[in-house]
Image (spheres, rainbow, N blue to C red):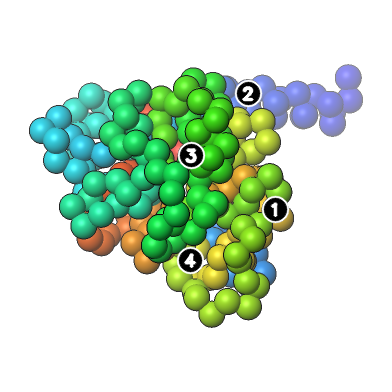
């Protein structure tokens, strides 16, 4: 056996225990550049990761902040690996649209048009089943009657079956910090994104379609967008939030980060 082969085998023997120690399906958070703008992107493997929606604590009070939720999880030796605001909400932090938390419907599906971004039809629903996720336009979601153990309705849709929302204008001057979610074609990868600087809807939607490969993507919110990603050193502070979406893991598990 050559010296080169023996050396390669020795290195492999050293690496195998390290590889075995890596958490399966870990949330991967990192930075992406798209058309001169940087975005924070967290990708969640499904169903390996424990992705959930959160609204209120045991006393019915909205969680409001990431740290309150993380502290509560710590009582069960768990923690948040990643989280962001998970849907639009009223001033009392009640959800604007359809919300399902752990199989419990907290708010019905809203199908009629209305004011603001939520009412810019078509809007849509992020639905998490037992083995995969969907982002689906609201009326199609209503007909599909999916079994969602977690669901959040928001709007507008960013990408619908590979096409951008018809009301988006490439040259729009409406630019905000925005966050959203897209799902891979097989539903096994949920991609959560927050812009690091202001973008318009058209560019944000193209990021999901052209860069991240998600044929369906949903806008979550704008100026209130917040991200909790310890692997990136992100602990965004701000006003009290309504619904929160996040991944729960055992305390001490490492979350992957990429540049």
Residue at point 41% right, 25% down? 149
User: Residue 77, located in which quarter of the rendered image?
Assistant: top left
Q: Upstream in the sequence, badge 3 or badge 2?
A: 2
Q: Is residue 99 left or right of residue 133?
A: left
Judge depth for marks 2 and 4 and give the one in front.
4
For disc 3, the marked residue is 126
Query: Mark 4 falls on what kind of element?
Result: loop
Residue 246 drawn at (x, y percent): 38, 39
Please say whether residue 68 is visible from this viewpoint.
no
For disc 1, the marked residue is 163
Crowd tier of the residue under label 3, counting other residues whose Cα lies within 10 Å: few below 14, some 14–19, many 20 or above: many
Q: Quadrant of the N terminus?
A: top right
For disc 4, the marked residue is 196
Q: Upstream in the sequence, badge 1 or badge 2?
A: 2
Report how far apart the C-alphas of labels 1 and 3 lie in the structure.
Answer: 17 Å
Q: Upstream in the sequence, badge 4 or badge 1?
A: 1
User: Residue 148, located in which quarter of the rendered image?
Assistant: top left
Query: Mark 2 falls on what kind of element?
Result: helix
Crowd tier of the residue under label 2, counting other residues whose Cα lies within 10 Å: few below 14, some 14–19, many 20 or above: few
Residue 242 drawn at (x, y percent): 27, 48
Report how far apart the C-alphas of labels 4 and 1 lie in the structure.
Answer: 24 Å
User: Nearest the camera: 140 or 246?
Assistant: 140
For disc 2, the marked residue is 16
């Amino acid at each position: 056996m050559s010296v080169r082969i023996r050396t390669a085998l020795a290195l492999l023997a050293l690496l195998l225990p390290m590889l075995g120690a890596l958490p399966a399906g870990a949330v991967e958070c990192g930075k992406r550049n798209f058309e001169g703008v940087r975005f924070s992107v967290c990708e969640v493997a499904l169903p390996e990761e424990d992705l959930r929606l959160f609204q209120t604590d045991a006393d019915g009070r909205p969680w409001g902040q990431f740290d309150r939720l993380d502290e509560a999880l710590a009582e069960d030796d768990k923690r948040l690996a990643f989280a962001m605001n998970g849907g639009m909400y009223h001033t009392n932090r009640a959800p604007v649209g359809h919300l399902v938390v752990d199989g419990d419907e907290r708010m019905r599906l809203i199908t009629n048009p209305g004011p603001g971004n939520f009412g810019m039809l078509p809007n849509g629903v992020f639905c998490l089943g037992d083995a995969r996720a969907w982002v689906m336009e609201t009326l199609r979601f209503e007909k599909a009657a999916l079994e969602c153990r977690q669901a959040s309705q928001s709007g507008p849709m960013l990408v619908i079956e590979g096409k951008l929302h018809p009301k988006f204008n490439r040259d729009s001057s409406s630019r905000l910090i925005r966050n959203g979610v897209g799902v891979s074609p097989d539903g096994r990868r949920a991609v959560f994104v927050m812009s690091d600087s202001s973008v318009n809807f058209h560019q944000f939607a193209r990021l999901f379609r052209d860069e991240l490969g998600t044929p369906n993507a949903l806008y979550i919110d704008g100026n209130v967008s917040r991200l909790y990603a310890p692997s990136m050193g992100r602990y965004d502070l701000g006003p009290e939030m309504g619904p929160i979406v996040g991944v729960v893991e055992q305390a001490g598990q490492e979350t992957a980060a990429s540049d």
